Image (cartoon, rainbow, N blue to C red):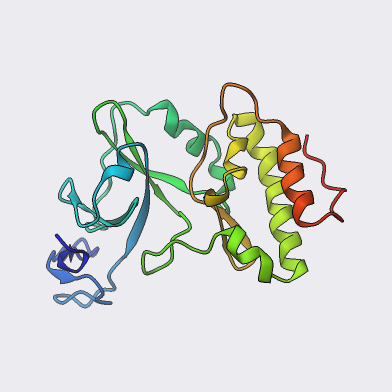
Amino acid sequence: MSRFAVKLQCPNPDCLYAENQVGQVTCDRCQSPLTYRYLWAVGRKAAQMAVGMLVDCRYAVVSPQVWLDTQPGLLPEAPAQIPDSALPYLQLHSQRLHLPGLFSIHPVDESPILLLENAPIDATGNLLPLLESAWPTAPAVRQLNWLWHMFQLWQALKPQGVSSSLLVAENLHVEGWRLRLREIVVDASDPVDSIQSEAWVQKRNPNLSRFQYR
């Protein structure tokens, strides 16, 4: 199934017309605005899902690990048990300005796929620019703002054992002034040395010695 063959259900509970074409703005039947909920799929199995697949007759894989909820008017299924990999998203809910949140859990054998909402994905299903690609052309004030977000996030992530989330280049995206993380990365068995993060900062701006990660 191609991306453009996917049908989108109307979110209006009094309508739920399920034959809207992807790309439409309003429902063909009731003219309600259509909801495009793009989710980031986390897990070993998620990366293996081919573009064009429709998972559980609901989630269309529109690009690697980006799924479109084709039934946005329905609640996601709640699993009987929440896996350990999902707990950091619940514990760090207060950081949703920068972090995605847990939307649903799709069970696949023993490797559940976490579906994340509020991920750094734009309204058309494309990932937002990476911090690394945006950095060279960004004004110094904006660079400082991103670094300040890193500093604040480090303090929140480290106690939860997920500070590695800030050390994976492809995990760091930006939306204007805001730093946004694609997913949460659990630290390895050996604690991440905070010096690594400080070195990342210093490499990009040696004048930021006042930022000390503890």
Frontmost residue, 30 versus 146: 146
User: What x and y, as percent, mark residue 77?
Assistant: 25, 40
User: In the drawing, does residue 55 fall left or right of residue 120?
Assistant: left
Q: Residue at x 67, y 71 (%)?
A: 137
Q: Is residue 170 above or below residue 133?
A: above
User: In the drawing, does residue 178 fall left or right of residue 116?
Assistant: right
Please state, as top left, top right, bottom left or bottom right, where the C terminus lies in the image: top right
Q: Residue at x 20, y 57 (%)?
A: 52
Frontmost residue, 77 versus 122: 122
Q: Quadrant of residue 81?
A: top left
Q: Residue at x 53, y 49 (%)?
A: 171
User: What x and y, as percent, mark residue 211?
Assistant: 82, 47
- Furthest residue to the top? 189
User: What x and y, as percent, mark residue 122?
Assistant: 43, 66
Q: Is residue 111 above or below residue 99?
A: above
Q: Is residue 210 above or below residue 71?
A: above
Please state, as top left, top right, bottom left or bottom right, where the N terminus lies in the image: bottom left
Q: Residue at x 24, y 55 (%)?
A: 51
User: What x and y, as percent, mark residue 44?
Assistant: 35, 36
Q: How many marks?
A: 0
Q: Is residue 192 above or below residue 60?
A: above
